[in-house]
Image (tube, helix red, strand yellow):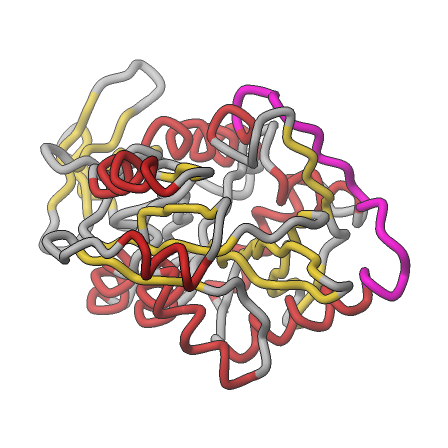
Amino acid sequence: MGGFSSEYEISLKSGQVVYDTLDKLKYNAYRIHIFKEKWVFVNDLNEEFQIDKNDFSILVNETRITFDCVFNAIHGSPGEDGFMQGYFELLQIPHTSCGMYQAALTFNKRDCLSALKPYGIKTAESFFVNLGDTINEDAIVAKVGLPCFVKANRAGSSFGITKVYKKDELQHALDVAFKEDDEVIIEAFLDGTEVSVGVINYKGETKVLPITEIVSDNDFFDYKAKYLGESQEITPARIDNDKAEKVRVVAKKVYEVLKLEGFSRSEYIFKDGEPHLLEVNTVPGLTAASILPQQAAEAGISLNELFENAIESSLK
């Protein structure tokens, strides 16, 4: 848990939920905090023990401890963008998230959408900008229209996102996004019902969880809506069977085309009755307020079953 990005606080909460939920008679769980300045095991007395990065082991009271499996609860970098996956794969330590390439691809919004387009996955019209590019505001508006969304390409939890209504607001929105990443994606505003769909590997099969409808009290599903209760998350979603089936099929296809493993949660907006993909999360939130645990509960899967399944699947 932890991480290098603005999402570290949410990750610490997710990791704590996993730690508190796991059956202590079945698993010896260790809270490992991963930060730029330190990698440490934090015990129940809040004492810290250094991680040996050579083999991801810890020395506690002169006993060397190694791990059978890593439960990855790091949102953002380095847990959701492929770095930790590559590290654990080199050390041959099983982990609960998808592979290194899949993590890197899905964390890069524009590369992920580009990879899925040939498979008929619908997305919003988009425009890409890198830090240092000359900004042609007229060209941006001509392609994506107004209002539009300016997003940091590689960030989560709605950090670095602004909804832009006027052309002269674009530069400020880009400045906000560039604080999170040096790549930005600008997307057309899709006016329709927004839904979130969890897809997991459950007992060896791809399982699509009940769909959640997102109704933000704010202008869009931003950080406050996600984590501070300023939204309604309605599971199951209030959409007709035709739409529900369409988005289930697309979400399962996305999971399988990308060869994902473990947890995933993808976001869609319906335009003209068709689901348009916004993004794919491979380390979704696992806090009490998070969407995936809500969906699992609706499917009759407890938090304990959800987490145990992830561990058992990775150990296989």
Tell which residue pokes out farthest to the bottom in this image: 118
Tell which residue pokes out farthest to the right in this image: 241
Q: Is residue 218 visible?
A: yes
Please state the extent of the stretch shown in magenta in the rendering.
227-244
Question: Number of callouts in the render?
Answer: 0
Residue 246 in percent (x, y) is at 77, 69
Q: Is residue 61 left or right of residue 286?
A: left
Q: Is residue 158 visible?
A: no
Give the residue displayed 49% in from the left and 48% down from the top: 146
Residue 27 in percent (x, y) is at 49, 42
Residue 231 in percent (x, y) is at 65, 27
- Nearest the viewer among 176 and 10 is 176
Residue 68 painted magenta: no
**Can you tell which quarter of the image residue 276 is in?**
bottom right
Decide: is 118 above or below 83: below
Give the residue displayed 37% in from the left and 47% down from the top: 151
Give the residue displayed 32% in from the left and 61% down from the top: 139
Locate the N terminus by quadrant.
top left
**Can you tell which quarter of the image residue 106 is in?**
bottom left
Q: Is residue 316 left or right of residue 48?
A: right
Residue 229 painted magenta: yes
Residue 284 in percent (x, y) is at 50, 46
Give the residue displayed 84% in from the left and 51% down from the top: 239
